[in-house]
Amino acid sequence: MKIGIAGGGAFGTALGVALALDGNDITLWARSADAVKKMQGARTNARLPDVTLPERIVATTDLAPLFDCQIILLATPAQVLKDFLTEHRTALAGKYLVACCKGIDLSRMTGPATTIRDIVPDAVAAMLTGPSFAADIARGLPTALTIACADDAAGAILQTALSTTHLRLYRTTDTVGAELGGALKNVMAIASGIAIGAGLGESARAALITRGFPEMQRLAAHFGAQPDTLAGLSGFGDLVLTCTSAQSRNYRYGHALGSGKDFDPTTTVEGAATARAVRQLASDLRIDMPIAAVVADLTEDKTDVATALNRLLSRPLKEE
């Protein structure tokens, strides 16, 4: 099976490695000519140290071979996805398009699968999400993900095509739940990083995770997500992973905010933009999401950690 991947970052490359080792021919498109040169020559990607790229991966800056693939994994940042789809909608028509990013587009207020469906309506829109780190996937460590596609027959095709010996995919038609679970857990990961970075302790982090999950459920339920989806890999599973590991970019970003340290501005942190989108959605829809609102304010320097903590702790006491 020939599979295309748009995006030569850590996650897109890691998926390419896993799929190539399972016998698939992979076209990996990246914007950076230098990155492509290293991937083709030295068979390495700076985002995945100590990982050798299989020969079945062909890295390129040319979009033509990418568009020759029937299945294309879109491993671009969530805030870039709309522009990529809009620019290439004609070439992408009729393809299986699988979003591998997690977030809510700030300009459209939509998740990745919905963005695909709106901009390229004659493509099959799907989303690959769940608890996973690129380094684990590239090293062949066991990983379970959700493949979400509104068309169950098409989802079954993708499930078979993208599952490997160590990468196990579970199928759902609930694209909304998968989108929101993947997006919202990044916001809570930032909050967890803030708690540990500020020295608030493990108990505070546990409280944030526990109270953050109902926030995720409230917003997802409003948009018709199924409760089981949020309780599964794409929701609770991903929440636990990213809130408890320094491998998570969102967690590391939150840790930097909480400890008052600088954070690498070139590192993509999907949860920061998502928090701002969620703050707006929650306000418009009158949905109570205090943790997301605090995170959004902190990412924009509209408050400080001490004030944000006081906001959360001074909320009215209520039943569990």
Image (cartoon, grey):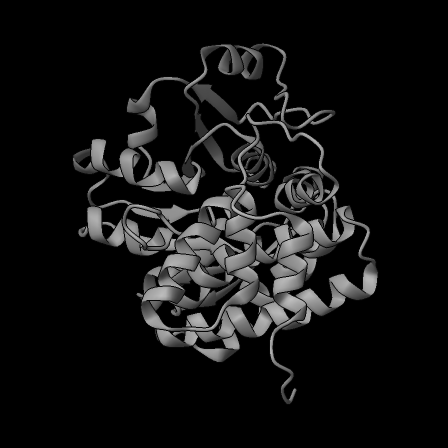
Image position, residue 105 (x, y; %):
35, 48
Query: Quadrant where the N terminus lies?
Result: top left
Q: Give the number of callouts.
A: 0
Q: Does residue 144 appear in this view?
A: no
Image position, residue 81 (x, y; %):
35, 39
Q: Within the image, what quadrant is residue 15 found in?
A: top right
Which residue is at a point 69% across and 55% down the rendered structure image? Answer: 192
Q: Which residue is nearer to you in this view: 70 or 7? A: 7
Which residue is at a point 26% across and 38% down the rendered structure image? Answer: 85
Image position, residue 220 (x, y; %):
43, 71
Query: Quadrant where the C terminus lies?
Result: bottom right
Q: Which residue is nearer to you in this view: 94 or 11? A: 11
Q: Is residue 68 left or right of residue 55?
A: left
Which residue is at a point 38% across and 69% down the rendered structure image? Answer: 173
Which residue is at a point 62% across and 25% down the rendered structure image? Answer: 53
Image position, residue 7 (x, y; %):
45, 31
- Please, is residue 222 above or below residue 12 in the view? below
Q: Does residue 72 appear in this view?
A: yes
Q: Is residue 228 left or right of residue 71?
A: right
Q: Which residue is nearer to you in this view: 2 or 155? A: 155
Residue placed furthest toward the bottom:
319
